[in-house]
Amino acid sequence: MEKMYKFCQSCGMPMKKDEKGGGTAADGSKSQKFCSFCYQDGKFFRPDFTAKQMQELVKGKMKEMGIPGFLTPFFTYGIPKLERWRS
């Protein structure tokens, strides 16, 4: 049984906010680790991204959602510590 995660281990989005309930593995099973925006059919969306690029993408999406720009660093500072980016 795969561990349940509160946040996507790629972008940091709260998993409960994912309308699709998580990404999908190659066999079609749901991922409890990655959201549907980051992980589909067993592959990462933008597989060549760095953690820094993911932080910038997430900051932009948050601004689009109306979150004030000064708050975005608070919500994205932990992205490099997520499982996808640890190596």
Image (tube, grey):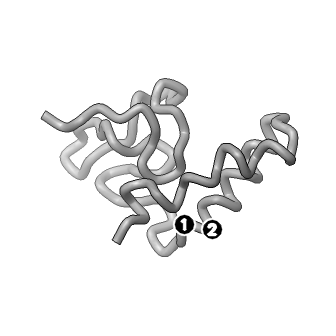
> Horizontal placement of 79 versus 43: left or right?
right
Dot 2 crowding, Cα within 10 Å, few <14, some 14–19, many 20+? few
Q: Position of residue 48 (x, y in %)?
A: 48, 75
Question: Is disc 2 in contact with disc 1, using a CB cutoff of under 8 Å?
Answer: yes
- Looking at the rendered structure, the secondary structure element under dot 1 is helix
* Residue to which mark 1 is pinned: 51
Residue sitting farthest toward the bottom: 48
Q: Amino acid at mark 1?
A: Ala
Q: Quadrant of the N terminus?
A: top left
> Horizontal placement of 46 versus 22: left or right?
right
Q: Residue at x 53, y 71 (%)?
A: 49
Dot 1 crowding, Cα within 10 Å, few <14, some 14–19, many 20+? many
Q: Residue at x 19, y 46 (%)?
A: 27
Q: Position of residue 17 (x, y in %)?
A: 54, 27
Decide which of 43, 2 is in the foreground and name it.
2
Q: Amino acid at mark 2?
A: Gln
Q: Quadrant of residue 77?
A: bottom right
* Residue to which mark 2 is pinned: 53
Decide which of 73, 2 is in the foreground and name it.
73
Q: Which mark is residue 20?
A: none
> Horizontal placement of 44 versus 58: left or right?
left
Residue sitting farthest toward the left: 1
Decide which of 64, 3 is in the foreground and name it.
3
Q: Would you place residue 16 above or below residue 23 in this image?
A: above
Q: Would you place residue 5 above or below residue 86 in this image?
A: above
Decide which of 6, 40 is in the foreground and name it.
6
Measure the alpha-carbon separation of dots 2 and 1. Answer: 5 Å
- Looking at the rendered structure, the secondary structure element under dot 2 is helix
Q: Quadrant of the C terminus?
A: bottom left
Q: Residue at x 54, y 66 (%)?
A: 51
Q: Residue at x 54, y 39 (%)?
A: 13
